[in-house]
């Protein structure tokens, strides 16, 4: 039995529109990501694997299942449907809360944290940033002035060696989705 793969688009293209006018940001990183989602009864056999003479079935969604990322994103979108595009952007386990002022931001953060608590989701405190005017989200530096790339990431691209094999060219071209958002190529 073959599984068709669900595609998942990173939210880079829409950040400019969504964050227009935002001045205050909070970034949350969920602990355990996919493992927060229980596998539906009757579907656990699809997660089965053999290890040391025994068959194991996952009780929760694990990393590596074909559509785990898409299913998790869908779940998160449903969970935060009333806040998406209002004050929240979610990509998998990375949540960005954005607001135009301090008063609204405190309210927005409270709403998101209450929703997470009600659904027994927990954040990695060491990876969270609260109530700041500049934040790194999905490799992009976001502020009230707009977006930029982390200078270390720019330097890493500038330091790439010249491609010498076909696979080197393919690896370099994999950045094509990311580049149009941040530059004009002539």
Image (spheres, grey):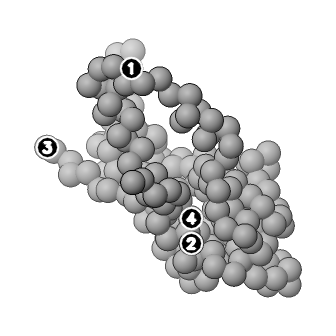
Total count of labels: 4
Give the label, 2 or 4, closer to the camera.
Answer: 2
Q: Quadrant of the C terminus?
A: bottom left
- CA gap between label 4 and label 3 equals 32 Å
Give the label, 3 or 2, closer to the camera.
Answer: 2
Q: Which residue is mark 4?
A: 90
Where residue 77 appears, as percent x and y from the top left, is 49, 70
User: From the viewer's perspective, is residue 154 above or below residue 50?
Assistant: below
Question: Within the image, what quadrant is residue 98 found in?
Answer: bottom right
Q: Quadrant of the N terminus?
A: top left
Of pointers 4 and 3, the one earlier in the residue sequence = 3
Give the label, 4 or 3, closer to the camera.
Answer: 4
- CA gap between label 4 and label 1 equals 35 Å
Disc 3 crowd rating (10 Å Cα; few below 14, some 14-19, many 20+) is: few
Give the label, 1 or 2, closer to the camera.
Answer: 2
User: What label sits on residue 1 in the rendered view?
Assistant: 3
Where residue 62 appears, as percent x and y from the top left, is 46, 42
Q: Which residue is mark 2?
A: 16
Of pointers 4 and 1, the one earlier in the residue sequence = 1
**Left or right of 2, for residue 70:** right
- CA gap between label 2 and label 4 equals 15 Å
SS for callout 1:
loop
């Amino acid at each position: 039995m073959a599984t068709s793969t669900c595609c998942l688009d990173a939210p880079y293209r829409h950040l400019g529109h969504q964050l227009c006018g935002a001045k205050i940001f909070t970034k949350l990183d969920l602990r355990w990501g996919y493992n927060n989602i229980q596998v539906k009864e009757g579907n656990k056999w699809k997660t089965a694997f053999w290890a040391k003479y025994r068959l194991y079935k996952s009780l929760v969604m694990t990393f590596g299942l074909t559509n785990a990322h898409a299913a998790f994103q869908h779940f998160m979108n449903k969970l935060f449907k009333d806040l998406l595009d209002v004050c929240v952007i979610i990509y998998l386990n990375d949540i960005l809360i954005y607001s135009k002022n301090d008063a609204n931001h405190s309210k927005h953060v409270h709403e998101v944290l209450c929703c997470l608590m009600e659904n027994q989701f927990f954040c990695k405190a060491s990876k969270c940033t609260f109530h700041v005017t500049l934040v790194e989200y999905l490799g992009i530096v976001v502020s009230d002035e707009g977006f930029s790339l982390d200078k270390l990431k720019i330097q890493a691209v500038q330091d790439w060696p010249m491609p010498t094999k076909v696979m080197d060219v393919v690896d370099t071209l994999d950045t094509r989705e990311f580049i149009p958002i941040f530059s004009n190529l002539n």
